[in-house]
Amino acid sequence: DAGITQSPRHKVTETGTPVTLRCHQTENHRYMYWYRQDPGHGLRLIHYSYGVKDTDKGEVSDGYSVSRSKTEDFLLTLESATSSQTSVYFCAISAGTGKMSYEQFFGPGTRLTVL
Amino acid sequence: AQKVTQAQTEISVVEKEDVTLDCVYETRDTTYYLFWYKQPPSGELVFLIRRNSFDEQNEISGRYSWNFQKSTSSFNFTITASQVVDSAVYFCALSPGSSNTGKLIFGQGTTLQVKP
């Protein structure tokens, strides 16, 4: 199994509070991703990183920010949580992209509930 | 537009039946990658297969087989002699080669229930 952990695994918070989710990998992979999973939508990309301090937006990035100060850690922050951000969040890692595209391995997920 | 469609929302079969999960994709890229993932009730996402657009050979792995047809933009997944442990949500995903991000575009998923 790929060495990916996410913390916390479950969180309940209130609308308007900031929340940070952490993804940690031990594979030294360059690429890291944050997805959210919602019924009827599959998984959708929020943000991704292609190296330390190199990040970019995915298709559902509004209301989220990310940071990557070390290869092994990728943080997802909800600056002011809203009920629409209640979801299951998955982190993924990959060794390569484009013509060298490798499969993405996923972390165990974080279930976030915003009341 | 880049898109993946899994038209079957839910499928229910009886153990030992064969079942095919459909996946249709849209992309203008000539180089792209297709994936299948399994999400059992425990919630984790398990990688099953990756295919690149230049390799149309069908693949078989035990009871699992995949049929990739570029002519119909489909990448269907068949489970032969299904078992209760195959009950899960299955996702098909596309990674366009031109995006250079490695991001995956997922279909909505197909929930497979295998009854004993």
Image (cartoon, grey):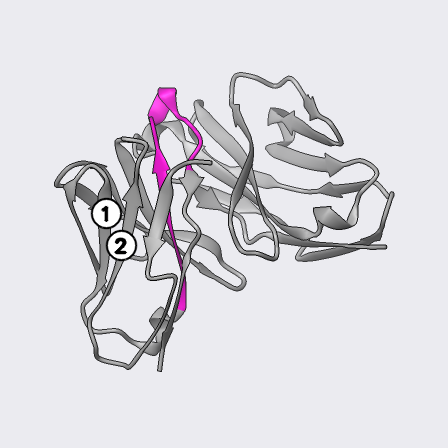
Question: Residue beneath label 1, please?
Answer: A74
The mark nearer the N terminus, 2 or 1, is 2
Percent x, y for residue B68?
64, 27
Q: Are marks 2 and 1 on the same chain?
A: yes
For disc 1, the neighbor class at 10 Å (few under 14, some 14 to 19, many from 20) is many
Vertical arrangement, residue A3 with respect to residue B70, above or below: below
**Would you say residue B1 is visible in this rendering?**
no
Say whether marks 2 and 1 touch (CB < 8 Å). yes
Going 71% across and 46% down the picture, which residue do you hit? B86
Query: Who is closer to the viewer here, B72 or A91?
Result: A91
Going 53% across and 55% down the picture, which residue do you hit? B43
Q: Secondary structure at mark 2?
A: strand
Q: Secondary structure at mark 1?
A: strand
Percent x, y for residue A33?
32, 44
Going 49% across and 58% down the picture, which residue do you hit? A41
Chain of the residue displaying label 1: A
> Which picture quadrant has residue B36?
top right
- What amino acid type should be assigned to the residue bearing mark 2? Arg
Question: Residue beneath label 2, please?
Answer: A22
Chain of the residue displaying label 2: A
Assign the N terminus of chain B to one quadrant of the image. top left
Vertical arrangement, residue A99 with respect to residue B82, above or below: above
Which span of residues is magenta-colored? Answer: A87-104
Vertical arrangement, residue B36 with respect to residue B86, above or below: above
Say if the magenta span includes residue B115: no
Per the model, the C-alpha gap separating discs 2 and 1 is 6 Å
Percent x, y for residue A89?
38, 58
